[in-house]
């Protein structure tokens, strides 16, 4: 597989190690504690990859041997925004990489009457428009919830170019739909699955991520 199948889709390097991690979390016989452990490892890789794409400025420091080291430092602040509930599983991975990171939440659920996604709740950092935003949701299926969440961010003044949408698996259809609305958002993912089933689950996928991560 090419490492960048679509514009603004940043794929994790498809190493044997990564394929091994996906093999464990996709296996229906994997028990919950292992699912959490190996999903967390992938989440950490996604966060690290997202951080690789943030702008930096040249920064020189003096080392403990009194020598100069010409390095870089990050420009700008970041925050996370998780799409509740499954996206919350990715918050810890972000916290492990970015100390004291601000994390907002968006709750979108299917409206019983219309069967369409509906925004129920948003709690976001006040200064979110000045930040780079890591939008967190482990599965990009149809793209409906992610698009609604991104709309919320944009209404709050966040530029598309400053949004990184991190997910473990996305569908081709979901990527196309999402990018037809937000072509400049970068999707950071480890796997692109070919299709969805009649219940909008990813195929081959891994089932319901939230259930496997949170339920016994
Ligand atoms: N959400 C999930 O948890 N799994 C899918 O396959 C699609 C959406």
Image (tube, grey):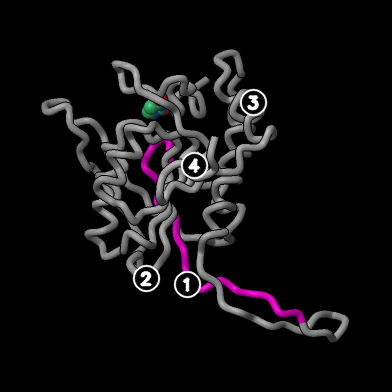
Residue 19, image x, y percentages = 63, 30
Circle 4 or circle 3, nearest the eye: 4
Left or right of 207? Residue 198 is left
Q: CA distance from mark 4 to mark 1?
A: 23 Å
Q: Are marks 3 and 1 in contact (CB under 8 Å)?
A: no
In the image, the segment drawn in magenta is 69-88
Q: Which residue is mark 3?
A: 34
In space, the residues marked 4 and 3 are separated at their CA atoms by 20 Å
Disc 4 and disc 1 in contact, CB within 8 angstroms: no
Question: Which mark's residue is nearer the viewer, 4 or 1?
Answer: 4
Residue receiving disc 2: 130
Q: Quadrant of the N terminus?
A: top right
Q: Residues within 10 Å of mark 2 (few under 14, many from 20)?
A: some
Disc 2 is placed on an element classified as: helix
Q: Is residue 216 visible?
A: yes
Where is residue 138 drawn, in percent x and y?
Answer: 45, 37
Q: Are marks 4 and 2 in contact (CB under 8 Å)?
A: no
């Amino acid at each position: 597989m090419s490492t960048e199948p679509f514009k603004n889709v940043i794929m994790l390097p498809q190493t044997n190690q990564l394929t091994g991690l996906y093999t464990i979390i996709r296996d229906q016989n994997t028990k919950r504690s292992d699912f959490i452990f190996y999903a967390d490892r992938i989440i950490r890789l996604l966060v690290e990859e997202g951080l690789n794409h943030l702008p930096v400025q040249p920064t020189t420091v003096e080392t403990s041997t009194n020598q100069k080291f010409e390095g870089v430092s990050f420009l700008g602040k970041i925050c996370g925004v998780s799409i509740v509930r499954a996206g919350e599983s990715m918050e810890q991975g972000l916290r492990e990489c970015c100390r004291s990171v601000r994390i907002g939440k968006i709750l979108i659920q299917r409206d019983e009457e219309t069967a369409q996604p509906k925004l129920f709740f948003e709690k976001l950092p006040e200064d979110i428009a000045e930040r780079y935003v890591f939008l967190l949701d482990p599965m990009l299926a149809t793209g409906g919830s992610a698009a609604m969440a991104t709309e919320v961010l944009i209404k709050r003044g966040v530029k598309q170019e400053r949004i990184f949408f991190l997910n473990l698996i996305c569908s081709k259809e979901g990527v196309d739909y999402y990018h037809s609305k937000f072509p400049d958002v970068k999707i950071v993912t480890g796997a692109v699955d070919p299709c969805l089933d009649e219940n909008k689950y990813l195929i081959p996928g891994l089932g319901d991520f939230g259930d496997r991560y949170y339920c016994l």
